[in-house]
Amino acid sequence: MGIEQQVGFDVERVRREFPILETKVRGTKRLVYLDNAATTQRPKRVIDTLKEFYEKYNSNVHRGAHWLSDLATKMYEDARKTVKEFLNAHSHREIVFVRGTTEGINLIATSFSRGLLKEGDEIIVTEMEHHSNIVPWQLVAQQTGAVLKVIPINDKGELILYELENLITDRTKLISIVHVSNSLGTINPVKEIISLAHQKGIPVVVDGAQAVAHISVDVQDLDCDFYVFSGHKIYGPTGIGVVYGKEEWLEKMPPYQGGGDMIKEVTFEKTTYNELPYKFEAGTPNIAGAIGLAEALKWFKQFDINEVHSHENELVQYATELLKEIDGVRIIGEADNKTAVVSFIADGVHPHDIGTGLDMEGVAIRTGHHCTQPIMCHFGIMATARASFAIYNTREEVEIFVDALKKVLKFFRR
Ligand code: PLP
């Protein structure tokens, strides 16, 4: 099945497709799920697809000499085509299935470092990266002697872009940036950064973990060299994600892991590698996950992304407005261009207490450093409380959340 026609956006109709939204927290409180940046919920269609795969089609892919394996292979490869269409990639050869964004960035960093990075080379990231887009580069820097440089942010949580021009030198080999920050919600001007980088012949990796479910992503329009995302943050299963890589780069890069499926021929003297994208998919992949992800993408593509974006933006703005009315509450991350996330702190009450208190009211948010400790360091804090929105959230839920927060703050400040 191809990607579907877009339909009008009706939040109540959307909600009915998510069985988990009916859940009562501890059997009593209505679930208000505002932890979507950590993981989204799945529509019934995706859950059914997984069940159906295991009930009817389960088999290993690519090597089978039987009907069931052919069927599973076709479904798996069709899933790749759906991802290709979703990202508007040039070819299915540019779509590699991985476990998620973390594994995807590790794949790129490790593979790129083998042959394309040497001592003194420079990699640029930003101060607002998730640890998944910092630590893999630190690991390869340690191994190769390359150096990590950082684009700073301002106090609104936006990149200080003019610094990038100062950071780029003739030793810059790669830039890796987050599209949308998971702690701040900032939407970065990645197209502009890519264009600047390409003028100097530098490839750009984009961490799209928090972007794909909220803003339009077209890898050919962005002209990024790599784009990475996780299925579970866009209404798909866990354990599946995608690396998009331009063919020219994936051809140049050696395999990430060795094993079955990624080879053409193996002898003890020499192994030759499979063609793209299989060169990067060693071992039995997450077949059901890929098929479930494709279903999630088809489901999501029914909606006009601009309508989804404005719906979520309205929720962000409404929540921000109401939070600012509460004494001693400070928003962390006030970029002009942001989406889906509201991070905040409150005088005299630790974010963890806020999280626990809200949970007692049925409201699920996330507290902590959100795997972005450099951001916390920038703002001189240890943690924030973060409400993050998805397609199925409502204004009423924002009100329940803010009323519950008022109760929690009153309790802890008494
Ligand atoms: N990058 C960003 C911006 C994220 O928000 C996350 C997860 O929260 C990741 C990377 C890592 O994603 P995963 O845990 O699915 O690998």
Image: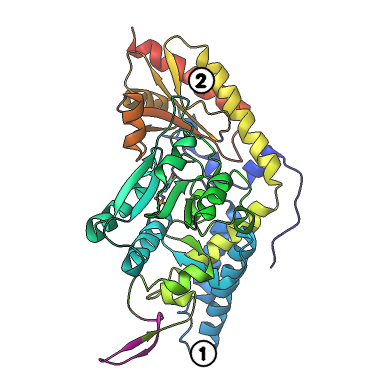
> Where's residue 179, x and y in %?
51, 45
Foreground residue, 39 or 154? 154
> Which mark, residue 66?
1
> Where's residue 157, x and y in %?
46, 30
Q: Amino acid at mark 2?
A: Val
Label 2 CA crowd tier, 10 Å (few <14, some 14–19, many 20+) = some
Report if residue 74 lies within the magenta region.
no
User: Which image quarter holds the C terminus?
Assistant: top left
Question: Which range of residues does the magenta coloring cover?
Answer: 260-271
Q: Determine which quarter of the picture holds residue 102.
A: bottom left
Q: Which residue is mark 2?
A: 402
- Of the residues under marks 2 and 1, which one precedes in the sequence? 1
Foreground residue, 334 or 70? 334
Label 1 CA crowd tier, 10 Å (few <14, some 14–19, many 20+) = few
Q: Can you name the residue that lies furthest to the front here?
A: 170
Question: Relative to residue 188, is residue 304 drawn left or right?
Answer: right
- Element carrying mark 2: helix
Q: Amino acid at mark 1?
A: His
Pointers 2 and 1 in contact (CB under 8 A)?
A: no
Report if residue 269 lies within the magenta region.
yes
Q: Can you name the residue that lies furthest to the top here?
A: 414
> Which mark, residue 228?
none
Foreground residue, 366 or 112? 112
> Where's residue 45, x and y in %?
61, 57
> Where's residue 411, x and y in %?
36, 12
